[in-house]
Image (cartoon, rainbow, N blue to C red):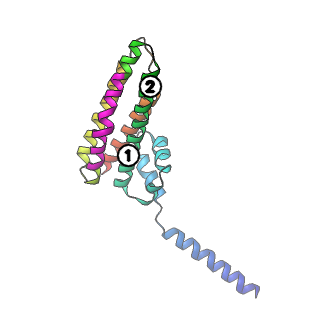
């Protein structure tokens, strides 16, 4: 009886190993895609935090990244608007207003259009939109060059890196 249970256990383990190796491992796809971007760690952490990344292709990964950028930029817009309400520094308020006015069309129009372009397999247009949005973030950063330290710097740097990652992914398509 022990021989039969050992044989059955061995057979079960082998079947489990074979069946697991037949299941597509999209973590491998995420890893392969992220290795082709300039910020591997940020790419991996962003995609691993989204359960949909495990069940998609490269196009889906690009779409997830664009949607993550929209989310980050929207959070940054809300943060900026909160700072505008709290500050009494006229120069800082002016710079923050500029950034908020820059973020609004990106969140409402440019990036949703980029996501639509990805859905429609218009990857060059999506990449153009992403790169254009990145330039707009740069113009916000430039408002703070000089004597004023930007309270948005860390957020903008992260968003810029996400733009670079999305652009690299779009170039794979």
Q: Quadrant of residue 72?
A: top left
Residue extending farthest top? 147
* Residue 105 among those drawn in magenta: yes
Looking at the picture, tell me which residue is in the foreground, 154 or 96: 96
Question: Residue at point 35% right, 25% down?
Answer: 99
Q: Which mark is residue 103?
A: none
Residue at point 71%, 86% (across, down): 4
> Does residue 150 show up?
yes
Distance Cα–Cα, label 2 vs label 1: 21 Å
Q: Which is nearer the N-term, disc 2 or disc 1? A: 1
Question: Dominant secondary structure of the magenta stretch?
Answer: helix
Q: Look at the numbered discs 2 and 1 and tell me whether their residues touch, using CB distance below 8 Å.
A: no
Looking at the rendered image, the quarter that the N terminus falls into is bottom right
SS class of the residue under badge 2? helix
Residue position for label 1: 67
Residue at the spot 34% in from the left edge and 29% down from the top edge: 137
Could you tell me residue 65's position as x and y percent?
A: 39, 46
- Residue that appears at 58% across and 73% down: 16
Kindly identify which numbered label has been placed on residue 153: 2
Outermost bottom residue: 1
Q: Residues within 10 Å of mark 2 (few under 14, many from 20)?
A: few
Indicate the quadrant where residue 135 lies: top left
* Residue stretch in magenta: 97-116
Is 106 one of the magenta-colored residues? yes
């Amino acid at each position: 009886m022990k021989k039969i249970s050992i044989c059955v256990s061995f057979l079960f383990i082998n079947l489990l190993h074979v069946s697991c190796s037949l299941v597509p491992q999209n973590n491998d796809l995420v890893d392969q895609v992220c290795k082709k971007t300039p910020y591997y760690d940020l790419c991996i952490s962003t995609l691993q935090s989204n359960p949909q990344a495990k069940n998609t292709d490269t196009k889906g990964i690009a779409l997830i990244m664009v949607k993550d950028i929209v989310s980050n930029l929207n959070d940054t817009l809300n943060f900026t608007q909160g700072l505008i309400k709290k500050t009494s520094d006229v120069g800082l308020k002016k710079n923050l207003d500029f950034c908020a006015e820059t973020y609004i069309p990106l969140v409402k129009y440019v990036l949703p259009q980029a996501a639509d372009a990805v859905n429609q397999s218009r990857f060059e247009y999506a990449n153009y939109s992403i790169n254009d949005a990145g330039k707009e973030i740069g113009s916000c950063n430039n408002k703070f060059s000089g004597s004023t330290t930007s309270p948005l710097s860390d957020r903008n740097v992260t968003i810029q890196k996400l733009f670079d990652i999305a652009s690299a992914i779009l170039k794979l398509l």
